[in-house]
Image: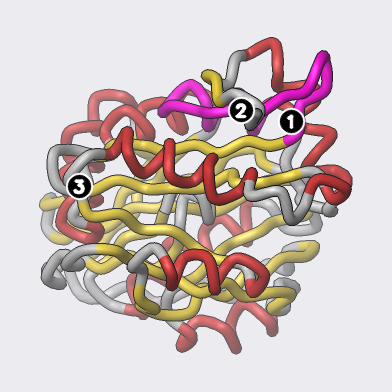
C-alpha cells in the first residue's frame, strides 16, 4: 500500500531542513517557514521519518509557482516525487504554473507538460562595492516602506503576471526594499532579506537593465563584504555581478505549464528565490 500524502506541517520543518542539508541546498529552517507561510505544502512520511516534501503558491487567479520538491536520497525510485508534485499541481487548479528545475527534475516536469522558458543564473559571494551606478534623468532611489506596498505589488505584477502582494509584504517584514522613481512615479524596485548563507537580493523589477543594475549596485554597496546571493533572469547583468564578488555558481531551467504573461513595461531581473519565482 502506498504511503499516504498529508499536509506539510510546521512541526515537520526541522526534518525538512535536514532533507535540504543532505543535498546541500542552502535553506535555513527559517527559509522553510517563510515559504510554508505563503503557500501549501505536502509531505510523505514513514513512521516518524519525513521522506519527501513539495509546496505550491497560488499568486492570483491565473498564475502559481511550484517548488521545494525533495525526496530523501535513499527513497529515490519509489515514485514519491511524482506523487508529491501531482498533489501540489492539483491544488493550483487551472492556473498556469512556473517552476525552476534542477537537471535531475527536468525529465519529470517534461512528462507533466512543462516546457522550457529560460535559464536562471545563480550568483553569490562576498559583495564588492561597485562605483555609483548612473541613473537616467529624473530617476531617484529611496527606501521603500510598508506604505509603498501597493506600488511594489503593481510593479511586480507588471513584471511577472503574478499577484505576490503577500510575499512582498512578508519580505518587507523581515528585510528591506528600495524604490526607483522617475519624476516621482515608481518604475522599479529591489528587495533584500536574510536567506541561506547570508542575504538574497530579490525580487528586482525595473524598466531596463541599467536601472536594474542601479538597484542591485545599491545593495552590493550596502552589504560590501557580506555574503550575498542573487538569481538573475537577464545574463547581461552577469559580468557586472562577477566583477563585484558574485560569480555564477549554478543555473536552473525555468519551466512553465500554460501561457506566460506578456512582457510589460517593467521587467523581472531577479527572483524572490527559485521556488517562489
Give me the disc on residue 16: 1
Residue farthest top in this picture = 11
- Asked whether residue 214 appears in the rendered view, the answer is no
> Quadrant of the image for the C terminus?
bottom left
Marks 1 and 3 in Cβ contact (< 8 Å) = no
Give the residues in magenta.
Answer: 31-51
Residue 95 drawn at (x, y percent): 20, 47
Residue 67 drawn at (x, y percent): 51, 47
The residue singled out by tag 2 in the image is 43
Secondary structure of residue under mark 1: helix
- Report the Cα–Cα distance between label 3 and label 2: 22 Å
Classify residue 176 as left or right of residue 239: left
Answer above or below: position of 179 versus 98. above
Quadrant in which residue 231 is drawn = bottom right
Residue 1 drawn at (x, y percent): 65, 28
Secondary structure of residue under mark 3: loop
Classify residue 141 as left or right of residue 200: left
Amino acid at each position: 500500500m502506498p504511503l499516504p500524502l498529508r499536509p506539510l506541517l510546521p512541526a515537520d520543518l526541522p526534518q525538512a531542513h535536514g532533507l535540504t542539508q543532505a543535498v546541500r541546498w542552502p535553506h535555513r529552517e527559517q527559509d522553510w517557514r517563510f515559504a510554508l507561510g505563503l503557500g501549501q505544502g505536502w509531505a510523505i512520511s514513514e513512521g516518524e521519518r519525513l521522506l519527501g516534501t513539495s509546496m505550491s503558491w497560488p499568486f492570483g487567479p491565473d498564475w502559481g509557482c511550484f517548488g521545494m520538491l525533495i525526496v530523501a536520497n535513499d527513497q529515490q525510485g519509489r515514485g514519491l516525487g511524482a506523487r508529491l508534485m501531482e498533489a501540489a499541481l492539483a491544488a493550483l487548479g487551472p492556473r498556469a504554473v512556473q517552476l525552476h528545475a534542477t537537471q535531475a527534475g527536468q525529465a519529470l516536469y517534461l512528462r507533466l507538460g512543462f516546457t522550457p522558458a529560460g535559464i536562471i543564473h545563480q550568483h553569490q559571494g562576498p559583495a564588492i562595492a561597485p562605483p555609483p551606478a548612473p541613473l537616467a534623468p529624473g530617476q531617484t532611489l529611496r527606501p521603500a516602506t510598508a506604505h509603498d506596498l501597493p506600488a511594489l505589488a503593481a510593479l511586480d505584477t507588471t513584471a511577472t503576471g503574478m499577484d505576490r502582494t503577500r510575499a512582498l509584504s512578508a519580505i518587507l517584514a523581515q528585510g528591506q526594499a528600495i524604490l526607483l522613481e522617475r519624476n516621482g512615479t515608481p518604475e522599479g524596485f529591489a528587495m533584500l532579506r536574510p536567506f541561506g548563507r547570508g542575504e538574497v537580493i530579490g525580487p528586482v523589477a525595473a524598466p531596463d537593465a541599467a536601472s536594474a543594475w542601479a538597484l542591485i549596485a545599491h545593495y552590493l554597496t550596502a552589504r560590501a563584504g557580506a555574503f550575498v546571493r542573487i538569481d538573475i533572469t537577464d545574463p547581461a547583468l552577469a559580468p557586472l555581478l562577477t566583477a563585484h564578488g558574485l560569480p555564477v555558481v549554478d543555473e536552473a531551467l525555468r519551466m512553465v505549464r500554460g501561457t506566460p504573461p506578456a512582457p510589460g513595461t517593467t521587467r523581472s531581473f531577479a527572483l524572490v528565490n527559485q521556488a517562489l519565482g
